C-alpha cells in the first residue's frame, strides 16, 4: 500500500474538484496517491474508519471526503485544497 491515501466518494463534488489536481500532482512530480472510494466500497470505508482517531480531530470532528492521509506521518489534509498545498503536503 502506498503511504499517501485519498479517501473519496464517487459523487462527492469536492472530490470531483480534487481529482484533476491529484492527476496534475502525479503527472508533474511522480508522487502517487492511492485513491480509495469510500461511499460504495465498504472495505475502503472500513479502512478510513480505522483511522477515525487520527482523521476526525483534523477534519472538524468527523470523517469527510476528500481526506488525504500520509500513513507514515499521520499528516492529514481535509476537503478541497489548492495544488500547491497538496504538493507541499505530499512532498513532506
Image (cartoon, rainbow, N blue to C red):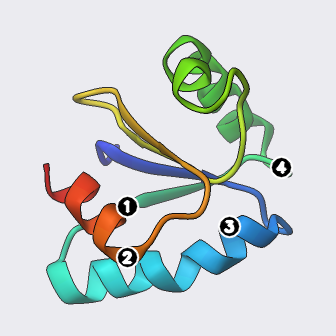
Q: Are marks 3 and 2 in contact (CB under 8 Å)?
A: no
- Characterize the local packing of mark 1: few (<14), some (14-19) or many (20 or more) Cα atoms within 10 angstroms: many
x and y, in percent, of residue 10 in the image: 79, 66
Helix, strand or loop at label 1? It is: loop
Residue name at image x 31 percent, y 48 percent: 2
Viewed as shown, does residue 3 lie left or right of 66?
left
Viewed as shown, does residue 64 lie left or right of 88?
right
x and y, in percent, of residue 91 in the image: 15, 58
Residue 24, numbered circle: none
Residue name at image x 70 percent, y 26 percent: 46
Q: Name the residue carrying label 1.
A: 33
Q: Give the Cα distance between marks 4 and 3.
A: 11 Å
Say which of marks 4 and 3 sits in front. Answer: 3
Helix, strand or loop at label 4? It is: loop
Residue name at image x 26 percent, y 67 percent: 87
| Residue 53 occupies quadrant | top right
Q: Earlier in the sequence, mark 2 or mark 1?
A: 1
- The residue nearer to you, when weighing 61 against 35, is 61
Q: Give the Cα distance between marks 1 and 4.
A: 18 Å
Residue 39, numbered circle: 4
The N terminus - image quarter: top left
- Characterize the local packing of mark 4: few (<14), some (14-19) or many (20 or more) Cα atoms within 10 angstroms: some
Q: Earlier in the sequence, mark 2 or mark 4?
A: 4
Residue 83, numbered circle: 2
Q: Give the Cα distance between marks 3 and 2.
A: 14 Å
The residue furthest top is 53
x and y, in percent, of residue 49 in the image: 67, 22
x and y, in percent, of residue 85 in the image: 33, 63
| Residue 3 occupies quadrant | top left
Query: Would residue 74 be visible to someone looking at this image?
Result: yes
- The residue nearer to you, when weighing 33 against 56, is 56
Amino acid at each position: 500500500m502506498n503511504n499517501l491515501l485519498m479517501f473519496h466518494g464517487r459523487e462527492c463534488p469536492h472530490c470531483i474538484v480534487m481529482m484533476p489536481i491529484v492527476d496534475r500532482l502525479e503527472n508533474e512530480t511522480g508522487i502517487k496517491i492511492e485513491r480509495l472510494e469510500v461511499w460504495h466500497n465498504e472495505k475502503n470505508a472500513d479502512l478510513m474508519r480505522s483511522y477515525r482517531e487520527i482523521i476526525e480531530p483534523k477534519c472538524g470532528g468527523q470523517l469527510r471526503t476528500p481526506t488525504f492521509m500520509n500513513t507514515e506521518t499521520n499528516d492529514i489534509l481535509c476537503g478541497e485544497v489548492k495544488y500547491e498545498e497538496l504538493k507541499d503536503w505530499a512532498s513532506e
